Image: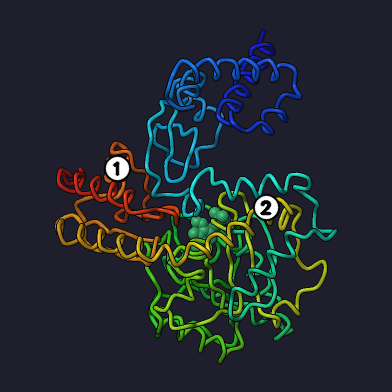
Amino acid sequence: MFAAARLAGRASSVAVAAAIAAPRQVATRALASNAAAATAVAAAQAQSQTQAQASSSSATQTNKSILPPVPEMVAMYKKYLMNTYDRPDVVFVRGEGLSLFDSAGQEYLDFYAGIAVTALGHNNPIVNRALAEAQPLLHLGNLFHSAPAIFLAKELVTSTAWADKAFFCNSGTEANEGALKFARKWGNTADPSLNKNQIVAFKGGFHGRTMGSLSATHNPAYQAAFQPLIPNNLVGTFNDLQSASDLVSDRTCAVIVEPIQGEGGVYPATAEFLAHLRKLCDQHNALLIFDEIQCGVGRTGHLWAHSAPQFNGVQPDIMTLAKPLANGLPVGAILVRDRVSELIKPGDHGTTFGGGPGVCNVARAVLGEVQQLLPKMQTNIKRFDEILESLRQQFPKVVLDVRGIGFLRGVELTAEYTAKQVQQEALRHGIVMITAGKNVLRLTPPLIVGEPQLERLRTALTSIFKSIKPAA
Ligand SMILES: Cc1ncc(COP(=O)(O)O)c(C=O)c1O
């Protein structure tokens, strides 16, 4: 009885998956290998077709009739998934460009982009085509050559003014882990007595959740429960030249910094600070690592955040990338100068999935498309600036500050209001956004955002700021 119920449950969840992916013949065909699933798929398709004929509205109606009600889904989430995120009671089933659709068919405007990931929006045809093209060889493993990784590496390296080589991995934290390992080898090679092993990072920085990256993410909320962390990680004050001078020494193997801190509240580095870090690293033979996992790949309106004119052309020795690089498929990259890559030998570092032909083919397409988009983005970035600045001026009692560059923006609220309050209200207005700490709204729309969507954001925030009450 129990087993039968579980099987039925599995079949119906396949039906849900099939309905969500209704137009994707390939996904449907793969799922149909299981007999129970095949029945469910056929039922879902028949139901979907009938509904499509009966109703002029979209596939979300189909999803609504197949998915369990939202409270049931939320209860299942609580029962079966670890409690690592605090999520609102909405189940998203589909995306199209900047729109997300929930299980009731309600449309929302996405100013979140899966935390700065879906740069080209949802269900993007260029991404879909690159993935379809890659299907004959999705995975190979790193013991053999495949073309997409080679082409992607060439395109990444040649699109910077300084990098010589790339290493591919699967996520942001993994990119930083690799960069920190390379830095350790740099230090240990320069000083075989193993005394050049300190890593300097900054308050407010976020570099990931795995042990190496976490040890460089000096936020008690993330670190406290996981002590002891990796030693020889020092923390300075962001944008404070003296603080950096006090920490960087001949014992430093690397300094890691985000040109724009995302998670920490959307704070851009000053050009002077980055230039000072460059100088300190050169003086002490340490590597400068730019973590562009959130701020890179076009988000600032420039391909690399550090190539935005605000930063006066300061260049790192290593840059880490991830989030938007394959528009939602897991990928990370570490770009390095030759003097770093020369130290790394076969066997020093590796990954099973990183640099797979499927994800690299998609990343190549994304990189090309983002480069094409950059000139077109400038007008919308200007409009976004104007809208945020006018909100700041219109609501001085609610908005304390507006920060960031391009489409990585933070709206800091005054102490009476919390970002979570506004985030929840925005969801009721059909806008998805996230926060960065207690008081900062983080706006990271897909880079394809246009004037009408920016206007919708303005209208929603105007209405919210007019009626908001101080947090209890
Ligand atoms: C600047 C920065 N570095 C690293 C990471 C970690 O990336 P991931 O979550 O892919 O491990 C993040 C994620 O938010 C980030 O914003």
Residue 206 percent location from the top left of the image: 48, 62
Q: Depth check: 30 or 271 in front?
A: 30
Who's the residue at 48% across and 76% down the image? 307
In this view, the mark in front (1 or 2):
2
Local secondary structure at mark 1: helix
> Relative to residue 381, is residue 195 depicted above or below?
below
Who's the residue at 16% across and 62% down the image? 393
Q: Depth check: 41 or 85 in front?
A: 41
Residue 141 percent location from the top left of the image: 80, 54
* 157 sits to left or right of 109: right
Q: Depth check: 367 or 240 in front?
A: 367
Residue 162 percent location from the top left of the image: 61, 81
Q: Depth check: 430 or 238 in front?
A: 430
Residue 250 percent location from the top left of the image: 59, 88
**Which residue is tagged 1?**
426
Q: Quadrant of the N terminus?
A: top right
Q: Quadrant of the C terminus?
A: top left
Dot 2 crowding, Cα within 10 Å, few <14, some 14–19, many 20+: many
Three-letter residue code for mark 1: Ala
**Which residue is tagged 2?**
359
Residue 217 visible to the viewer: no
Q: CA distance from mark 1 to mark 2?
A: 33 Å
Indicate the quadrant where residue 148 lies.
bottom right
Dot 1 crowding, Cα within 10 Å, few <14, some 14–19, many 20+: many
